[in-house]
Every structure is written in structure tokens, then in C-alpha cells.
Image: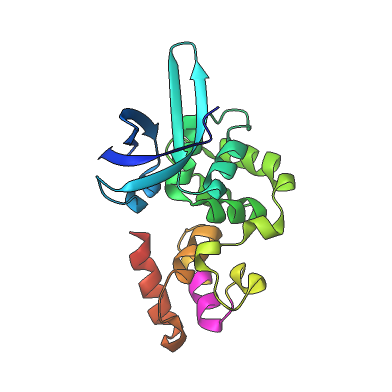
Amino acid sequence: MIAYVKGIIEEISQDNVVVDVGGMGYNVKISPDTASRLPGTGEMVKLYTHTNVKEDAFQLYGFLSKNDLDIFRQCITVSGIGPKGGLAILSVLDADALRYAIMTGDAKAITKAPGIGARTAERLILELKGKIQMDDALISREITDYGAAHALSADTPQKKEAVEALVSLGYGQAEALKAVNAIEGIEGMDAGAVLKAALKKMF
């Protein structure tokens, strides 16, 4: 119904933002990840929105990219996952990391979301795996000049060792790879230093 909301940010909380559009304030539900990436109050923002209409409510769910909105809409097609559950999943995994978790069958990473149990995570993987293309699973925020093939793998020995160590500690493969790929200056680090830096990003 409403493709996007573009206006001035009036208020921000962990799960909601008020956007002033031409003198009218829109309450838009957001994930904590989206909240952390918003500009400050008084700044312009454009949120791609999903409209959820119920008998007693008209709710907007907002995302900073169409990428996030697309995966959210795919999530809520899965039985047992409503808009609240979809937003919870995107509060712990961004769109690209979620696609990667689905492609690799990493249910453990998905169950990090509040209210999402193992069965629900496995159902999500089962129902969406055939709908996710490998090109869609690229972790775009961490892609470098190495290209697509490397974006989906730990492309250096120290990365590979660090990811394996994190998985052995109980972390999901998708979140481990995301943490490792987010480290800056990794080229000059050994596996131990990469692991230490990745663990810091987990907390």
C-alpha cells in the first residue's frame, strides 16, 4: 500500500521511528539494527515500508533498503512467522547474512532472534532455500574487490581458521563469517588476532 516513507525524523526508539512527512507523523516499526543505522533526529530519511493491516491496527514496518524489505516479506510468508518475528530475525541478522544462513542451512544463527525456536528456523530454511538465489546471498556490506566468489567464503587462511574456531565455540557459520568479514586491516593479522577481533564484534 505505502511503498516508502520519506521525511524528517522526529523521534527514534529501539523499535520505532516517527517520521514527519509534510506535517504528518508516521509511526514506523523498525529493528534495532535499523535504529542503529538511522541518521539523527531532524535529519531526512527514506524508509521502504511493508503495510500490515489488522482489524484493530494499521502498522508500517520500515527498512533502509529494498534488500531488507524483500527478505522481510519472504520471512513472513513462512507459517509461524509474522511481521514481529520477521523484524526479530532482522534484528540479529541483516538481509545478506540471513540469506547466507538460509543457503547454508545455519538454523543456529537464525535462532538467535528473540522468539524464534529451532523448529521455526528450520521451517524458514526449508521453505525459503529454494527461493533464494546464490547471487542474492552475497554479503554486500562486506564485499570487496575480491568479488562474489570470495564474499561467500573465508578467502584467506586466517579467516578460515577464525571462522572454524568461532563455529567450534558454538556460533553459527553465517554470523561467524559476517563478524570475520567486518574486521578492518585483516590482511596483516594472524588467525589468533582475527579470532580475538571477531569475538569482540560478537558482543
x, y percentage for residue 54? 50, 16
Magenta-drawn stretch contains 96:
no
Residue 162, image x and y in percent? 48, 74
38 lies left or right of 59: left
**Looking at this rendering, what residue extends furthest in the right direction?**
130
Viewer-nearest residue: 112 or 146? 146
Q: Nearer the viewer, residue 172 or 63?
A: 63
Q: Residue at x 58, y 78 (%)?
A: 145
Specify the segment rendered in magenta.
Answer: 155-163
Picture quadrant of residue 196 = bottom left
What's the coloring here?
rainbow
Q: Which residue is at a point 43% across and 86% down the rendered structure image? A: 190
Q: Do we see residue 15 in this rendering?
A: yes
In the rendered image, residue 58, in percent from the top left (x then y), is placed at 45, 20
Q: Relative to 177, does residue 25 appear above or below in the rendering? A: above
Q: Quadrant where the C terminus lies?
A: bottom left
Task: State which quadrant residue 29 falls in.
Answer: top left
**Residue 156 among those drawn in magenta:** yes
Outermost bottom residue: 188
Asked whether, in this view, residue 15 is left or right of residue 66, the answer is left
Using the rendered image of the protein, determine whether residue 165 is visible from the camera's viewpoint.
no
The N terminus - image quarter = top right
Q: Is residue 33 left or right of residue 79?
A: left
Residue sitting farthest toward the top: 55
Judged left or right of residue 102, residue 85 is: left
On screen, residue 29 above or below 146? above
What is the magenta segment's predominant secondary structure? Answer: helix
Which residue is drawn at the image coordinates 42% and 85% (left, top)? 189
- Residue placed most toward the observer, 165 or 95: 95
Q: Position of residue 69 (x, y in %)?
A: 54, 42
